[in-house]
Image: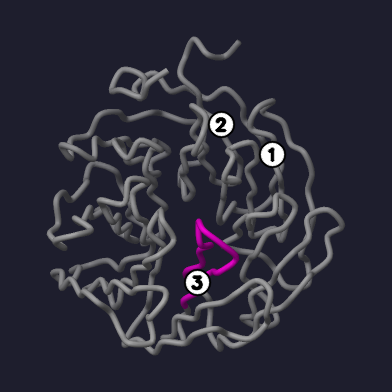
Amino acid sequence: MKLDDEVVRNLAVAKLFRENTGKINSIDYSSDGLNMISSSDDDSVIIYDCQTGTKKRSVNSKKYGVDLIHFTHAKNTAVHCSTKVDDTIRYLSLHDNKYIRYFPGHTKKVVTLCMSPLDDMFLSGSLDKTIRLWDLRSQNCQGLMHVPGRPVAGFDPEGLIFAAGINSESVKLYDLRSFDKGPFNTFKLQRENDCDWTCLKFSPDGKTILLATNGAVIRLVDAFSGNVTYSLQGHTNNKGIALEASFSPDSNYVFSGSTDGQIYGWSSESGRLVATLPSEHNPVIQCVQFNPKYMMLATACNHMAFWIPQGLED
């Protein structure tokens, strides 16, 4: 089945999970698309089976809290940042709910965390105005960059380049092998008037950089020229919340939540709004991601919804 406008408009909730007592603050798929993980303000981590549409397991991080959770390349481990005690990043074994390693260094809230698609490297960015590069095998920071404001960061699909969005006005591109020499390209964008960048993602084909905000606009930027190709609008965000936006695996669509309980889907090729999907979310939808391998969208507020095209429910 190929994703097209009709299929996007036909997405419907196939499974709804009411496992959480607090807001789900982040979700992530395993690279094979078979599993999904969520972290919540209620300090719980839940793993879902995407093929059967069932909850597999839950673990807790009551002492440190949990946010920005990501699978590593090993299916039974994840990294996450903390919401209590300190701002250390933690490497968790999901199998026995034990921590494998701690990554100390940030002195304020970590606001961006991403795994390399290639290996055990990962990036973190914090309100302490630093971006750090890490390797899962060592608790020592592999690289440190001081930046002039709140950072967002993301790896390109090849894992060779990363982009850092700084102060909601410039995107800097770094070669991972020589990032200490500084960016090899910088795109200056017009400063957002009434919102900040809260999320940076490359499209799966590597051609576009998505900049989500805590306002009612999502920017799509050409990853080679730095030109803003589209400003996606139509969704509502009247609470200043960091709403996640995500590409479909074919890079042709962008999905976002909103503060009105609806999911919005745009064509990334034309910038037009393709679908507005009503949901049972209540009403702020913070997390939205499309499965990298299967025809499934996941959205989350205090509860989790799995969407598939109507007609596929069987």
* Residue at 69%, 25% in the rendered image: 52
Label 1 with label 3: CB-CB less than 8 Å: no
* Residue at 49%, 48% in the rendered image: 287
Q: Which residue is mark 3?
A: 123
Q: Residues within 10 Å of mark 3 (few under 14, many from 20)?
A: many
Residue 200 image-quadrant placement: bottom left
Secondary structure of the residue carrying tag 1 is strand
Q: Which residue is mark 2?
A: 306
Q: Which residue is mark 1?
A: 48
**Residue 154 image point, x, y percent:** 41, 64
Q: Residues within 10 Å of mark 2 (few under 14, many from 20)?
A: many
| Disc sitting over residue 11 in the figure | none
Q: Examine the structure image and report whether residue 124 is included in the region drawn in magenta.
A: yes
Q: Examine the structure image and report whether residue 30 is included in the region drawn in magenta.
A: no
Q: Nearer the viewer, residue 103 or 73?
A: 73
> Where 61 falls versus 108 (above or below)?
above
> Where 273 falls versus 156 (above or below)?
above
Label 1 with label 2: CB-CB less than 8 Å: yes
